[in-house]
């Protein structure tokens, strides 16, 4: 067989590959999207089932869930407004610098224009006509006429520049005024949201007091703790079952199992409750740790993964669970606000929530767990004291 037919065959195969490859990628992407949609639907049904069960427990639990979800959303709004205010302040500062730059340029141009007008005035009103009848040497006259034309053009150009700068100053003033109005509106919105937050926190305090009284009268603290632990275990089992159908990430990274001892803590705080120690007034043990930290502090994902759950759960309040693959999960409870939703991918160090005291806690802090195949792991074996995120 000659070289030419071989070349043609190779070219045809290459073209066919180029046509098939995008179609294959598109089909793969479509299949993954369909898989993810199915997974998210299952998670939503799981959340609805949990809600139904929670609502049947106690009217105070139902009220607590509702108010803590609301507080979380209000805090999210405050965070967004705060960011908007910072942006508007930066915009205002930049606009004021722009206005000052145009004002300085206009001042210089006004001085140059004044000099030119004065020069023109000293030459007389018909300076070009005077040059023509000045009986100068023709070469000198031609040169002077050229100079005059340059001078005249420069004057026109300078006048145009002056007008352009005046227009820019007017436009900048308009933008400054608009930015001021937007800033004032954002500050009013912020004030309203903070008032709402204070009211909601007052209601939450009252609900917690009623819930504590109910538990004391019923003497069911141990029963409650066992019920909450069982519910969390059921949730984790359901998540692991659901996420066996979740599409894999295209980004190849280090396996979670290889990160033991290398992970940073999700928040800068003091270890208050240690893994394996007995819980107060019960024979149950802590399956994670509590990191005491100021309310509003950012919580960061310890590693790459997909958010499997982001909602309120009795006992843990606003909870985020991240699936890291190979049956590894990390849990973050008692959050004030959740910044991620189920199905989202996160990287190590991404801010996923803010510290709070949801779940009926008295003090702010983060409940943190790591699980392997549903079994609790000691977080201190995975996150060392010296391992901290640079920012967050």
Image (tube, rainbow, N blue to C red):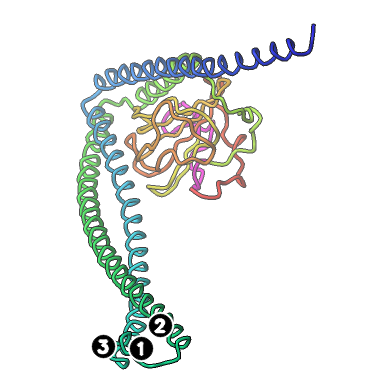
296 is higher (above) or lower (below) than 72: below
Q: Earlier in the sequence, mark 3 or mark 1?
A: 3
Write the residue at 39% across / 78% down: 149
Q: Is residue 241 left or right of residue 174?
A: right
Contact between marks 2 and 1 (CB within 8 A): the answer is yes
Contact between marks 3 and 1 (CB within 8 A): the answer is no
| Magenta segment | 266-288
Which mark's residue is nearer the viewer, 3 or 2?
2
The numbered mark at residue 125 is: 3
Is residue 270 found inside the magenta-colored segment of the image?
yes
Residue 60 x, y percent position in the rendering: 23, 30
Q: Indicate the secondary structure of the residue bearing disc 1.
A: helix
The kind of secondary structure the magenta stretch mainly shows is loop
Q: Nearer the viewer, residue 205 or 256?
A: 256
- The quarter holding residue 119 reads bottom left
Q: Nearer the viewer, residue 101 or 116?
A: 116
Residue count near mark 1 (Cα–Cα under 10 Å), binned few <14, some 14–19, many ≥20: some
Which residue in the protein does label 1 denote? 131
310 is higher (above) or lower (below) than 111: above
Residue 120 x, y percent position in the rendering: 32, 87
Which residue in the protein does label 2 denote? 145
Residue 280 x, y percent position in the rendering: 43, 34
Residues at marks 3 and 2, CA–CA distance in whole angstroms: 15 Å
């Amino acid at each position: 067989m000659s070289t030419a037919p071989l070349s043609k065959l190779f070219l045809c195969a290459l073209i066919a590959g180029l046509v098939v490859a995008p179609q294959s990628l598109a089909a793969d992407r479509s299949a993954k999207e369909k898989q993810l949609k199915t997974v998210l639907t299952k998670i939503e049904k799981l959340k609805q089932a949990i809600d139904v069960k929670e609502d049947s427990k106690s009217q105070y639990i139902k009220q607590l869930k509702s108010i803590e979800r609301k507080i979380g959303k209000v805090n999210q709004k405050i965070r967004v407004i705060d960011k908007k205010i910072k942006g508007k302040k930066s915009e205002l500062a930049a606009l004021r610098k722009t206005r000052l730059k145009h004002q300085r340029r206009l001042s210089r141009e006004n001085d140059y224009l004044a000099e030119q007008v004065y020069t023109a005035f000293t030459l007389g009103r018909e300076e070009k006509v005077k040059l023509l009848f000045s009986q100068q040497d023709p070469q000198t006259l031609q040169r002077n006429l050229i100079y005059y034309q340059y001078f005249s053009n420069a004057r026109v150009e300078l006048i145009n520049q002056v007008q352009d700068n005046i227009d820019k100053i007017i436009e900048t003033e308009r933008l400054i005024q608009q930015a001021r109005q937007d800033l004032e509106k954002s500050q009013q919105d912020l004030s309203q949201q903070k008032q709402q937050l204070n009211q909601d926190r007052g209601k939450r305090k009252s609900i917690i007091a009623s819930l504590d009284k109910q538990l004391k009268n019923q003497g069911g603290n141990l029963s409650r703790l066992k019920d909450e632990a069982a519910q969390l275990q059921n949730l984790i089992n359901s998540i692991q079952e659901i996420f066996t159908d979740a599409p894999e990430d295209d980004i190849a990274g280090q396996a979670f199992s290889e990160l033991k001892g290398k992970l940073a803590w999700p928040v800068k705080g003091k270890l208050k409750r240690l893994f394996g120690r007995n819980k107060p007034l019960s024979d149950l043990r802590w399956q994670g740790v509590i990191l005491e930290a100021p309310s509003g502090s950012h919580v960061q994902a310890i590693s790459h993964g997909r958010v499997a759950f982001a909602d309120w759960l009795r006992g843990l309040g606003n909870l985020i669970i991240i699936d890291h693959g190979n049956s590894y999960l990390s849990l973050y409870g008692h959050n004030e606000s959740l910044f991620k939703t189920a199905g989202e991918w996160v990287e190590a160090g991404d801010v996923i929530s803010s510290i709070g005291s949801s779940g009926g806690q008295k003090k702010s802090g983060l409940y943190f767990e790591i699980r392997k195949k549903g079994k609790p792991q000691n977080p201190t074996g995975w996150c060392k004291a010296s391992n901290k995120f640079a920012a967050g």
